[in-house]
Image: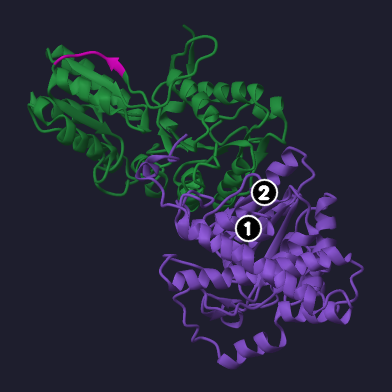
Amino acid sequence: MSPAAAKKAPSAKTTASKAAAAPSGLPKEKLLAMFREMLLIRRFEEKAGQLYGMGLIGGFCHLYIGQEAVVTGIQSAAKAGDAVITTYRDHAHMLACGMDPKGIMAELTGRIGGFSKGKGGSMHMFSVEKQFFGGHGIVGANVPLGTGLAFAQKYKNTGHITMTYFGDGAANQGQVYESFNMASLWQLPVIYIIENNEYAMGTSTKRHAANTELYKRGEAFGIPGVQVNGMNVLEVYEGAKKVIEHVRSGKGPYLMEVKTYRYRGHSMSDPAKYRTKEEVEDYKENRDPITTFRKYLEAEGIAGDAAFKKIEDEVKAIVNAAAEFAKESPEPEPTELWTDVLS
Amino acid sequence: MPTMTVREALRDAMAEEMRRDEDVFVMGEEVAEYQGAYKVTQGLLQEFGPARVVDTPITEYGFAGLGVGAAMGGLKPVVEFMTFNFAMQAIDHIVNSAAKTNYMSGGQMRCPIVFRGPNGSASRVGAQHSQNYAPWYASVPGLLVIAPYDSADAKGLLKAAIRSPDPVVFLENELLYGQSFDVPEGEHVVEIGKARVHREGKDVTIVSYAIGVGLALEAANILAADGISCEVIDLRTLRPLDEAAVLASLKKTNRLVVVEEGWPVCSIASEIIAIAMEKGFDDLDAPVLRVTNKDVPLPYAHNLEKAAVVKAADVVAAVKSII
């Protein structure tokens, strides 16, 4: 942070976290639950990709593969009842909120068993029960919505906070800064999470952001920011824990930039010609969040081959059951066309 | 029956609903300490305090979205736009975020929010501050769109709008704010979606809404002196539109004129004509006419502005041309 910026925004402290993953002190069950969550997201998304290839999923389908540590780390640090809102790359957030994989997959296939009865699709699902508020298709528009959820939490004094996820591309929308201003002005309990996967669709961060240190973008509004390594779930968890504590204690909003990488294209139709194969391979081979975490768990003696095999089998069964349900659940009745327009 | 201005009626509607339900709050530019740019929120800050009467920065896209999020989170926001011209900055949240919540969630979520503020031409404020957005919002499934004329409907419909579980676009009119009309005493809630017959007649039906109703009534008075009996229908709600009321009156008079303070192309008037063609064709003895503003951006010069905005004489001429 420049001295000038520090003067203007004395409460904004921005830091790039360089802490390597230290032994976390987390219980074994929690660590394995985090591993399982990431694996569930990976396998779910792979299955969604397959179903898309088979023509069972239509339109847009944005996969989260490569980014699993981000939502897993943050939601592992959140409390039940905290609100979550995100953009269109949303399947993982729903899984991390505890929404039933069957209902998510069936929404992808446009069936009545989906969370929105097949009327929302990949980008539009909600669960009032799990406090998941979508799933929004207009880039950046979920940011003021999340700010409003936090406004309601403060108004009703619920003690809960809102995780507002968006991408590096959305970070350039004007309404993001309108939201930052109001959230800071009114000290709203909202965490802005920029999942920086290096590409806004096909435009790299360097080509779309005048300053690529996105965690500093709250400085002008007095919003502290932190950058964490999104390829390491424990680093994300530790970062999120501090940020959540800050926000829950009533100190106002916080900005987290989580550096991550998506392996697949922006959506299914994207051949990703704007980046090199070597770059993608480097992430997959050397920085994969699931492989990294597995190695850590092995090195710490927390789990071995048998335990991982068991988790892999469980996850596979869940995903296969979700896919079966999504294929077998019927399409919505034609009368559903006219329901849910008005109350 | 006591009389009050439209401005006071709107204020009373908000105050009564805020007393009734703690989840109702008002936000917008200058709604609190300034007491409303047009004084519609006068006194609310003093009664309900700054947590429920919230001055926002000039940030329409942001606070419209924040309001929608607050509605998703269980509150009942009344979001004031200083004028609906500024809501152009926020229309994405009205259409994409608010109107589609119920449908996109398969009926799981609601968005109980009211977007309100003055709409249409004022006086000498130029092209960017003088536009009627009724046809824009009325084209969107998932919204309720209301545009009252007098104080009783302003109060009763705003109360109904605040209680509605669906998102409402509530279009007021700056030139009507200071006009006084009767308002029933006590609790007064008007059902959304019902037109009102302001004046019964037998020769021709004049359909209008908002400030156009005043012009229609003025024209009906002039025409009465010539022995022409006009029925004046105030649509009040533009979505859903009370087709039955329009068609019933058409059946009776067999002639229809639509008066609209707004542009003619793709207007509410166009929609009424389509309804008459599709569902009332056999009742028509003459073409349905649109009496609207001229199809130009609103000019500033006094004489040009007068020429551009619809007036009672235009209505009189239109009616005479089909009788």
Q: Which residues are magenta?
A: B197-202
Q: Three-letter amino acid code at disc 1? A: Met
Camera sees residue A241:
yes
User: For this rendering, which residue is in front, A75 or A227?
Assistant: A75
Query: Residue at point 24% right, 25% down?
Result: B246
Q: Is residue B112 magenta?
A: no
Pointer 1 local density, CA inside 10 Å: few below 14, some 14–19, many at least 20 = many
Residue identified by numbered label 1: A94
For the N terminus of chain A, which image quadrant? Answer: bottom right
Residue A64 x, y percent position in the rendering:
60, 71
The answer to whether residue A78 is above or below residue B183 is below
Residue identified by numbered label 2: A130
Callout 1 secondary element: helix
> Which residue is at the far top?
B1
User: For this rendering, which residue is in front, B302 or A83?
Assistant: A83
- The chain identifier of the residue carrying mark 2 reads A
Residue A221 x, y percent position in the rendering:
73, 60
**Shade representing chain A:** purple
